[in-house]
Image (cartoon, grey):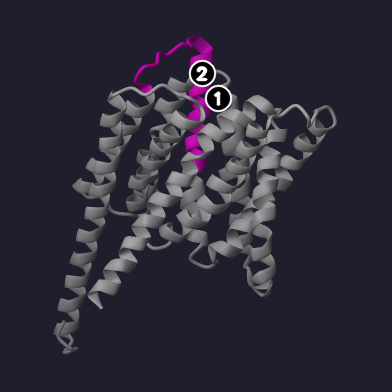
Amino acid sequence: MKDANFTQKLMVYVQLFAGMALFGTGTPSAKIVSEAFPMFLGPFLRLLVAALALTPFLFIYRHRLPRISRQNWIKIVVIGGVGIVAFTLFLLNGMQRVNGVVGSVVMSLSPAAMATSAVLFMHDSMGWRKVLAVTLAVAGVLVINVSGQSIQSSGWNLVLGSVLVFCAVASQTLYSLLGKQLIRDLSPLVALPLIVWVATLLFAGPGLYQIGSFDFSEPTLNAWLALLVWGLGPLAIGTLVWFRGLSQVPPSTASGYMSAMPATALALSYFWLGDEFHPIHLVGFALVFTSIGLVTWAHRIKEASQKKVQCAADTHDCAMPC
């Protein structure tokens, strides 16, 4: 029984890590797509790929659709509109004004933003282990992304670009927090296809407008591959896996795993984009994996403490001894 419980918990941690690792495939693939397709057409095609891939789940679970409450429909629309569409627009427009290092510095705030929001809005608890884990995660992401680069932006572009990228971080945080609430009532296999179709329809107007003036023979095979990876990796498969793990842990625990995203993005960029390796990156990877181990340890200690309290209460109530 204990071995089965351990295996179940291990699978939760694997899902959290794998979900964020798949999110990391979006960075190099999005870079390739943004260079090969117009600003709105690329994201629209990416969303369309993900929506079509997820549609079979809507057919399989179609009997659940009429039972979705009005409140959950509102969450679905907000997550699709803010968590996906606004995130994409904020990030694309922000990265046009600042270089990669500035964007990486701001995006590295994702674990801290997730943990802080969980405490403020979901009354989650943060012990010293989780605080240290988030700190190490931010430090690791900074080391991974900033080393070997320099800040080239300045003035108004630096300020506006940084604000836009931070708005993308806020959108991503809202995506996870609202998603956590939504999947309490709906299976991710039902919720995610609806969320993605909402985002696809919102992007359809400007995306279809740019189709008329675009030559589809121009993108290379690598660009089309990147489009498929960007749609299926972080959005279709990655979000399903992430939501599955997220449904079983507090948001503050999940926040520690968000650092796996930039770590995976950099590792993939070595092979796909030909990015230069710097030995200091190993320090960043070490900090990221240490933070993940620490937040996992903190979650296990909290679970053990809660179980001990429950056992004591059951014993006090003359229940069977633990």
Residue at the farthest right position: 212
Tell me which residue sits at (66%, 71%) in the image. 60
| In the image, residue 161 lies in the stretch drawn in magenta | yes
Q: Along the line of sight, which residue is nearer the eye, 261 or 94?
A: 261
Whether 313 is drawn above or below 240: the answer is: below
Residue 146 screen position, x and y as percent? 37, 22
Residue numbers of the magenta segment: 146-172
State yes or no: discs 2 and 1 in contact (Cβ < 8 Å): yes
Residue 69 screen position, x and y as percent? 62, 67
Taking 143 as reference, is 129 left or right?
A: left
Q: Which quarter shows the C terminus?
A: bottom left
Q: Determine the image quadrant of residue 1.
A: bottom left
Q: CA distance from mark 2 to mark 1?
A: 7 Å
**What residue does disc 1 label?**
94
Q: Which label sits on residue 98?
A: 2
Magenta stretch secondary structure, dominant: helix
The answer to whether residue 86 shows anywhere in this view is yes
Residue 23 screen position, x and y as percent? 49, 43
Tell me which residue sits at (47%, 10%) in the image. 154
Q: Along the line of sight, which residue is nearer the eye, 291 or 119?
A: 291
Is disc 1 surrounded by few (<14), some (14 to 19) or many (20+) residues within 10 Å?
many
Q: Amino acid at mark 2?
A: Val
Residue 107 screen position, x and y as percent? 43, 32
Whether 318 is drawn above or below 89: the answer is: below
Tell me which residue sits at (42%, 51%) in the image. 18
Tell me which residue sits at (63%, 57%) in the image. 193
Q: Which label sits on residue 49?
A: none
Secondary structure of residue under mark 1 = helix
Q: Amino acid at mark 1?
A: Gly
